[in-house]
Amino acid sequence: ALQDELIEAYGAAEVQRRLRELNAKAVVGKAFDSASERELYLLELQRPIVARYGFEGSAKGVGDAMVAFIPEEISKNSRVIKRNHQMESLLRAEAPLCDSWGIAQ
């Protein structure tokens, strides 16, 4: 499913490393540049995925794919909600709390 492919892409080690790098840039006062760079980076990941599901392989297609999950019968589905939370968490690219304490999971 579309959400599963996005979760897989966002969860890749290289993607998480790059998102943490972009998040760190935002912290040091380059938030606007970092947000634009982050948006472009994510768009490159998202375009081919949404295209496989019949959406245009562009920023518009990514937006259209997001809108497709708005209708209540879809947005209230527990599996969709769970996957949305997973994607949001991966996009934050935050290290788990146990990592910050030096404890392996």
Image (cartoon, rainbow, N blue to C red):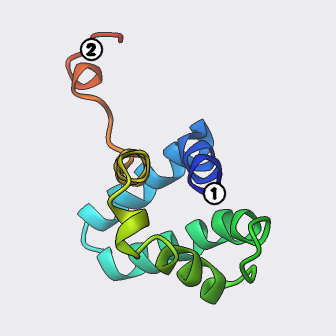
Image coordinates of residue 13 in percent, x first then y, are 58, 36
| Label at residue 2 | 1
**Number of residues whose C-alpha sits closer than 10 Å to that of mark 2, classed few (under 14), some (14–19) or many (20 or more):** few
Reading the chain from its start, which is encountered first: label 1 or label 2?
1
Image coordinates of residue 68 in percent, x first then y, are 52, 76
- From the viewer's side, name the closer residue of 74 and 54: 74
Q: Amino acid at mark 2?
A: Gly
**Mark 2 falls on what kind of element?**
loop
* Quarter that holds the C terminus: top left
| Residue labelled with disc 2 | 102
Q: Amino acid at mark 1?
A: Leu
Instruction: Name the quadrant containing residue 95.
Output: top left
Q: CA distance from mark 1 to mark 2?
A: 34 Å
Q: Is residue 101 left or right of residue 23?
A: left
Image coordinates of residue 1 in percent, x first then y, are 65, 51
- From the viewer's side, name the closer residue of 24 and 11: 11
Q: Is residue 39 left or right of residue 44?
A: left
Image coordinates of residue 51 in percent, x first then y, are 77, 72
Closer to the eye: label 1 or 2: 1
**Mark 1 falls on what kind of element?**
helix
**Number of residues whose C-alpha sits closer than 10 Å to that of mark 1, classed few (under 14), some (14–19) or many (20 or more):** few
Q: Is residue 39 left or right of residue 84?
A: right
